[in-house]
Image (spheres, grey):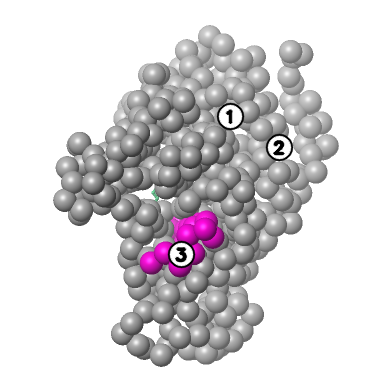
């Protein structure tokens, strides 16, 4: 490996065909933002669509449901069609609705049909806590003891999962499988295709949490035959804090009654008939529950515009280049700093890296003081996400240089090694 320098980082930026997108975003002043895997930044296009939707309320009042450039009544479906491009869904398989955890509840309520000895839900021990809480509560609602009925596939090293271990756990007593697409700590991308194939062969419905993969890696959910998926839009999709989530249901399940029914799951034409017998939408629309959160969906419209323009393939390629470059720089500059790389170094890494260190909490504080925003994950993880649309190779260079100075001069020692309330 040849020696990396600031000059060659700048050279790479000059050749980068996505470099101009950085100007589309509001980057906090004097900041290198490496936290887009937790909360993406605001773009000018997202701001514009938020203001447009606010204006439609201001100028149209209730007529905004059916008039204006983005009629609110059809917005969830329209945004769903754009998101389908990112997850490999066909039109009608993706809807913008709810939030990650709420959508998971909806999907488990719909797809978890325990019968006889087939009662267990298969997940993994590295899964995000909210998903585990949701699965346990769903089991409890059906009268099953979560300790007995939730199977969590073990990791050999606390970082990664082996697809073969998961497949081995797809036994006859499993009624549903819920797994992450990209692990929130280590950033490992699971082989969704292989896992879906194995689940389909055993007739077990399988779904994925795409929170850390949507907008960062490619998916072909329809082609793979994945039964369902759910995600948020505030990380790589830059939709803003608490922005509306996404939900995919494969068309082979169209017509399946929603576990949690509500009037926005009705066919558009009959919803306002106000009949007490629901007439569900024929596609994924059926899994909506109540009135869409229009103002929390508005920024997603503008943001998705950029993803459509660039295409997820190019975004993934640049993301891999940025994280690959960061890994090489860490090797070059931080060899003696006591860090352990906690993410896959090959192409099964997602959009972020994980550096582990026993002083991680206060190293993050020192980085923030120095204008780099990382993401701390208890107990010892520093997640760094150089994002394709708004980070440069030079950002990566400066991040590693700042980290090097912090470690060499032990600048973190003035902080307490304890996390803040959030992260
Ligand atoms: C992987 C993963 N799953 C689920 C959630 C929960 O999402 P929400 O709070 O939007 O329901 C998060 C939140 O960060 C997450 O990262």
- Residue name at image x 63 percent, y 28 percent: 347
Going by the image, does 136 lie left or right of 143?
Answer: right
- Residue name at image x 67 percent, y 40 percent: 316
Q: Tell me the crowding category of disc 3: few under 14, some 14 to 19, or many 20 or more residues within 10 angstroms, Cα based.
A: many
* Tag shown at residue 317: 2
Is residue 254 on the magenta stretch? Answer: yes
For the C terminus, the image quarter is top left
Is the C-beta separation of discs 1 and 2 under 8 Å?
no
- Residue name at image x 48 percent, y 16 percent: 339
Q: Estimate the spatial distance between the alpha carbons at disc 3 and disc 2, rounded to whole Å.
A: 29 Å
Quarter of the image where one finds residue 422: top left
Marks 3 and 2, the one that precedes in the sequence: 3
Going by the image, does 142 lie left or right of 122?
Answer: left
- Region of the chain picked out in magenta, as a range: 240-257
Q: Nearer the viewer, mark 1 or mark 2?
A: 1
Q: Secondary structure at mark 1?
A: loop
**Residue at image mark 3:** 97
Marks 1 and 3, the one that precedes in the sequence: 3
- Residue name at image x 36 percent, y 79 percent: 278
* Tag shown at residue 63: none
Q: Is mark 2 within 8 Å of ligand 1?
A: no
Going by the image, does 36 lie left or right of 103?
Answer: right
């Amino acid at each position: 490996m040849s020696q990396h320098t600031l000059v060659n980082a700048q050279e790479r930026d000059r050749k980068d065909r996505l470099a101009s997108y950085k100007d589309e975003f509001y980057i906090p002043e004097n900041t290198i933002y490496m936290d887009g895997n937790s909360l993406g930044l605001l773009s000018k296009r997202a701001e514009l669509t938020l203001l447009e939707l606010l204006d439609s309320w201001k100028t149209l009042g209730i007529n905004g449901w059916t008039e204006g450039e983005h009629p609110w009544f059809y917005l969830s479906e329209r945004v769903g069609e754009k998101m389908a491009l990112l997850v490999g869904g066909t039109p009608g398989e993706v809807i913008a609705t709810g939030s990650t955890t709420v959508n998971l509840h909806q999907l488990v309520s719909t797809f978890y049909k325990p019968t006889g000895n087939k009662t267990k839900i298969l997940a993994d021990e590295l899964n995000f806590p909210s998903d585990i809480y949701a699965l346990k509560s769903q089991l409890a609602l059906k009268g099953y003891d979560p300790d007995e009925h939730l199977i969590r596939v073990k990791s050999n090293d606390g970082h990664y999962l082996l697809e073969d271990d998961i497949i081995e756990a797809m036994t006859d007593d499993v009624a549903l499988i819920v797994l992450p697409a990209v692990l929130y700590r280590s950033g490992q991308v699971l082989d969704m295709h292989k896992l879906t194939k194995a689940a389909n062969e055993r007739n077990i419905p399988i779904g994925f949490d795409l929170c850390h993969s949507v907008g960062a890696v490619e998916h072909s959910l329809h082609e793979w035959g994945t039964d369902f998926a759910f995600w948020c839009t505030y990380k790589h999709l830059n939709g803003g804090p608490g922005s509306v989530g996404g939900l995919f249901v494969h068309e082979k399940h169209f017509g399946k009654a929603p576990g949690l029914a509500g009037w926005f799951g009705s066919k558009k034409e009959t919803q306002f008939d106000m009949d007490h017998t629901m007439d569900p939408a024929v596609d994924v629309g059926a899994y909506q529950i109540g009135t869409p959160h229009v103002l929390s969906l508005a920024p997603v419209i503008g943001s998705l515009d950029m993803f459509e323009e660039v295409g997820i393939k190019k975004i993934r390629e640049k993301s891999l280049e940025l994280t690959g470059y960061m890994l090489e720089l860490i090797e070059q500059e931080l060899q003696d700093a006591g860090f352990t790389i906690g993410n896959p170094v090959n192409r099964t890494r997602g959009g972020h890296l994980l550096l582990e260190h026993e002083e991680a909490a206060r190293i993050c504080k020192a980085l923030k003081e120095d204008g780099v925003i990382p993401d701390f994950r208890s107990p010892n993880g520093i997640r760094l996400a150089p994002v394709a649309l708004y980070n440069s190779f030079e950002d990566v260079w400066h991040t590693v240089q700042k980290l090097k100075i912090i470690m060499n001069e032990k600048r973190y020692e003035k902080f307490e090694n304890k996390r803040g309330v959030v992260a």
